[in-house]
């Protein structure tokens, strides 16, 4: 049963990856395959982290334990842009 659930989640993320990659290619047709992959990977990773840290862990731990381990501000979404964060990891 767990394998079936894991397969379903992987399939959803694979399809999301392909949809985002097509959109990035449409917006930036001069990007190489590697550039499209890296940009898409960053978006999918952020999506996965959002789901785990903002949606799943608060339900798993409960609000009190979640705030104890991750801080009370961990459940709020940061809306301020931080220009010092570099999201590009190109060699």
Image (cartoon, rainbow, N blue to C red):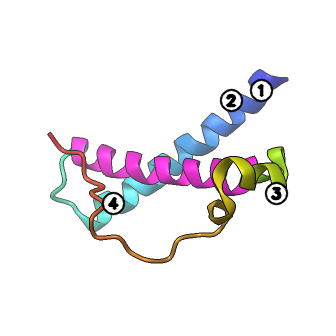
Q: Position of residue 12 (x, y in %)?
A: 63, 44
Pointer 4 or 2: first along the chain: 2
**In whole angstroms, how far apart are the C-alphas of marks 1 and 4?**
30 Å
Q: Earlier in the sequence, mark 1 or mark 3?
A: 1
Q: Is mark 1 in CB contact (under 8 Å) with mark 2? A: yes
Question: Which quadrant does the C terminus fall into?
Answer: top left
Give the image location of residue 46, x and y in percent. Answer: 49, 53
Q: Quadrant of the N terminus?
A: top right
Give the CA separation, mark 1 to mark 3: 29 Å
Q: Dot 3 corresponds to which residue?
A: 63
Front of the two marks 1 and 3:
3
Please tell me the numbered disc located at residue 24.
4
From which residue to which does the magenta span run? 34-57
Q: Are marks 4 and 2 in contact (CB under 8 Å)?
A: no
**Disc 1 versus disc 2: distance between alpha carbons?**
5 Å
Disc 4 + disc 3, Cβ < 8 Å:
no
Task: Estimate how packed mark 2 is, as few (under 14), some (14 to 19) or many (20 or more) residues with alpha carbons within 10 Å.
Answer: few
Residue for badge 2: 7
Image coordinates of residue 14 in percent, x first then y, are 53, 40
Q: CA distance from mark 2 to mark 3?
A: 29 Å
- Secondary structure at numbered mark 2: helix
Label pair 2/3, CB-CB below 8 angstroms: no
Residue 7 falls left or right of residue 20? right
Q: Residue at x 55, y 46 (%)?
A: 15
Magenta segment includes 16: no
Q: Earlier in the sequence, mark 2 or mark 3?
A: 2
Q: Which mark is residue 4?
A: 1
Dot 3 crowding, Cα within 10 Å, few <14, some 14–19, many 20+: few
Above-or-below relation of 33 to 81: above
Q: Tell me the SS state at disc 1.
A: helix
2 over 71 or under it: above or below: above
């Amino acid at each position: 049963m767990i394998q079936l659930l894991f397969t379903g989640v992987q399939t959803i993320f694979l399809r999301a990856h392909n949809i985002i990659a097509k959109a990035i290619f449409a917006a930036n047709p001069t990007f190489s395959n590697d550039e499209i992959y890296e940009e898409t990977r960053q978006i999918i990773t952020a999506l996965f982290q959002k789901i785990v840290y903002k949606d799943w862990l608060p339900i798993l731990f409960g609000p009190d334990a979640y705030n104890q381990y991750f801080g009370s501000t961990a459940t709020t979404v940061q809306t301020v842009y931080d220009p010092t964060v570099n999201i590009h990891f190109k060699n």
